[in-house]
Image (cartoon, rainbow, N blue to C red):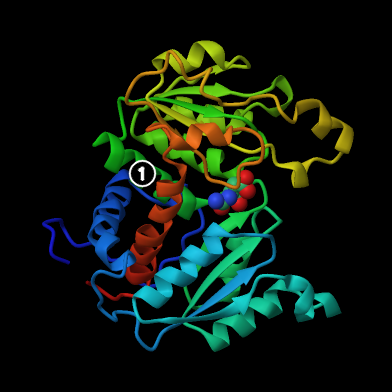
Amino acid sequence: MSFFLIQMNFEGKDIISIKDFSKKEINYILEYAKEMVLYAKGEKYKGILKGKVLSSLFFEPSTRTRLSFESAMNRLGGRSIGFADPSATSQKKGESLADTIRMADAYSDLIVMRHPQEGAARLAAEFADAPVLNAGDGAGHHPTQCLLDLFTILTEKKRIGKNKIALIGDLKYGRTVHSLAYALSMYKAELTFVSPATLKMPKEVVDECIELGVEPTQTSSIDKVVKDADVLYVTRIQRERFPDAEEYNRVVGSYKINNELLQNAKEKLIIMHPLPRVTEIDPEVDATPHALYFKQAFNGVPVRMALLSLVSGGKL
Ligand code: NCD
């Protein structure tokens, strides 16, 4: 690594929750990810993962997370195998998750997994010698998304702390905001949680923020939040996690970010979204300088390159 930082060793480490990392470790990963940007664009190449195989196991739909992991692996000279649809695997025949993981462990050097059940990634890590990277476990955690979100804020705002950051939408079921609220509290960002009353941030997450020294403001109204915000982090209502369709219909469309709402926003406001968006950001916003979500999605590649490289012990 060319930048000046005390070397840290992540070789063999699982990446299950952002809570497993110290702020120092997160800073290190983000600095390393900056080094990866030109490699992520294909403008530079170093095959530090040559000969390595990644198992990419997606038990839930994904576009960005899966493709950016696979792109990251390829960009560093590695290869990936796996599935995006578990109905085409032996899960369909009743195979246990533990056995599927044992197979991935036998066939590859690294495992990335998305699963509908909270805690599934932690379980998988117990059955695999290879590092397991959690690509989302139900409404639980999404640590690699969290790191790319932090990377985006850091590169756009030059720092993570001190920003006024509003997390908006489905704070109950959204895993990205669970990880991000925790991490942003480590950096002492000023947090506002905006959600319908039935989709508030879980109490455990709020309590963790408080323990880390941040007292988030909670509201259901977005109008007053926009004017002062440095970052709006918008999320989709997680339809697939609702036990009841009626309940979903009551809250869908609660928030819509459009140019009218942004009239009094700060010039440097950035709007982020883990994507996919459904109706919560009007496409007219895409053409404004506030729209950062597509760049944010690109940032998944350098950040995941950094992670794959670090856990497999390869270095730039
Ligand atoms: C998110 C997820 O899967 O949690 N997407 C992503 O990974 N970029 C957000 C979502 O599905 O709403």
Can you say whether 134 is above or below 211 in the image?
below
**Label 1 crowd (10 A; few <14 / some 14-19 / many >=20):** many
Q: Position of residue 146 (x, y in %)?
A: 45, 47
Q: Looking at this view, is 56 or 110 the one in front?
A: 56
At horizontal 25% and vertical 63% (from top left) the residue drawn is 38
Q: Looking at this view, is 122 or 280 the one in front?
A: 280
Q: Is residue 237 left or right of residue 105?
A: right
Residue 10: tell me if it is visible. no
Can you say whether 279 is above or below 214 in the image?
below
Q: Looking at this view, is 286 or 98 the one in front?
A: 286
Q: Position of residue 42 (x, y in %)?
A: 31, 70
Residue located farthest toward the top when viewing the structure as drawn = 224
Q: Which image quarter holds the C terminus?
A: bottom left
Q: Is residue 156 left or right of residue 226?
A: left
Q: How many marks?
A: 1
Q: Position of residue 163 (x, y in %)?
A: 34, 26
Can you say whether 106 is above or below 16 in the image?
below
Can you say whether 55 is above or below 31 in the image?
below
At horizontal 44% and vertical 70% (from top left) the residue drawn is 71
At horizontal 71% and vertical 28% (from top left) the residue drawn is 253
Q: Is disc 1's CB within 8 Å of ligand 1? A: no
Q: Looking at this view, is 180 or 155 the one in front?
A: 155
Q: Position of residue 183 (x, y in %)?
A: 42, 39
Residue 298: tell me if it is visible. yes
Indicate the quadrant where residue 306 lies.
Answer: bottom left
Which amino acid is tagged 1?
Thr
At horizontal 17% and vertical 67% (from top left) the residue drawn is 1
Residue beneath disc 1: 152
Q: Secondary structure at mark 1?
A: helix
